Amino acid sequence: MTCEELLKALNDYVDGAELNEICEEFAQHLAGCNPCQVVVDNIRQTIALFHHGKPYDLPVAFQDALQGTLKAKWMEKFGEKSINPD
Amino acid sequence: MASQNIDSAAELLGKARTGDFAAFQLLIESLQPRVYGLAMRMLRSTHDAEDVTQQTFVALIEHIDSFREESSLATWLLKIATNFALKILRRRKTVSMSSFSDITKEDSYGDLPHPDFIAPWTQTAPQIAERHEFQVELERALDGLDEKYRSVFVLRDIEQLSVRDTAEALGLTESTVKVRLLRARLMLREEMTRRFGDPEQSLRSDHNHE
Ligand SMILES: [Zn+2]
């Protein structure tokens, strides 16, 4: 396997696909190629970093408006009682 | 804090399906930021992201009776939201005269971006994530990606949809999703490594090496 071939197989390796054949060749190349090792590690870190990203907060005014819209839609579907049970 | 009364998502869904609005609200609490975040990242407009979020949850109310398992809920919502976002992107493209077909066109592995700056990072991802300004840097890096790569990366690597679900959401083949994901990952790796890599340990990639 060349560096170029390794690059193309990167997704399967990073995503942990059980493609043993690819994995074996992949591991063999990695063991002897420091730049590819670092690239693979960089990609793992990059994905982890984005995964650590915080969820977007809804703007407060929108949150309120959305709540109102959904409530109206809900009453339309399930009736008034679903919102104000006795 | 008493937590023994907190219902599981499955229980909440069951209650919501019978018309319990309070249960519905609890059910979607953590899903709203995900849908809104997806829309923001795809559209880069607060106004459009709000539209997509509202349309998506209204659609959920319309279809709530057909949900049997809460596990499929997030995927369903993200797919619906993607669909609404694509409609907006399509409309924008018509206005700007550039071709929308670009986003649904097949991609191949030819001409992959080659790693240029290769260096181990000075900090781990969780350490970087603790820094206050890091979120801004991430969003800026995402912004730098072409829309067709960004949407694949957001669905697959941020929202962790499967390759198949990502493909279905975007109307692409799985192979195109894989190619675009690889490009997105390589481009973001480059960008992030320029930021967080240690220049003193940088390596040279030898393209001819076997
Ligand atoms: Zn190599």
Image: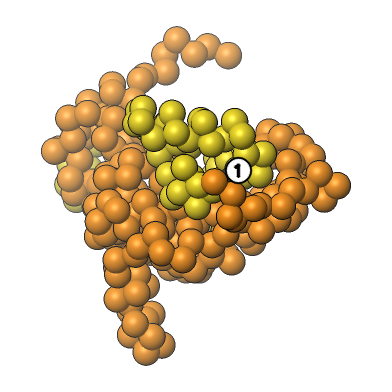
Chain colours: A yellow, B orange
Q: Residue at x 28, y 21 (%)?
A: B11
- Which of the 4 image quarters holds residue B12? top left
Where is residue A61? Give x, y as percent. 53, 57
Relative placement, left or right, of B210 versus B48 is right
In terms of depth relative to the viewer, which is nearer, A69 or B164?
B164
Viewer-nearest residue: A49 or B130: A49
Residues A25 and B143: in front is A25
Judging depth in this view, the residue of B97 and B63 nearest the camera is: B97
> Could you tell me which residue is drawn at 27 percent across and 51 percent down?
B174
Q: Does the closest atom of ligand 1 sit within 8 Å of the Cβ of label 1?
A: yes
x and y, in percent, of residue B86 in the image = 33, 66
Residue A33 in view here:
yes
Left or right side of B68 for B142: right
Q: Position of residue B129 (x, y in %)?
A: 69, 39
Seen from this angle, which residue lies furthest right? B200
Residue B137, x across and y down, in percent: 69, 55
**Residue visible at 73% across and 41% down?**
B120
Which residue is tagged 1? A36
To which quarter of the image does residue B104 belong?
bottom left
The reply, left or right, for residue B79 in relation to residue B149 is left
What's the chain of the residue with tag 1?
A
- Circle 1 residues within 10 Å: few <14, some 14–19, many ≥20: many
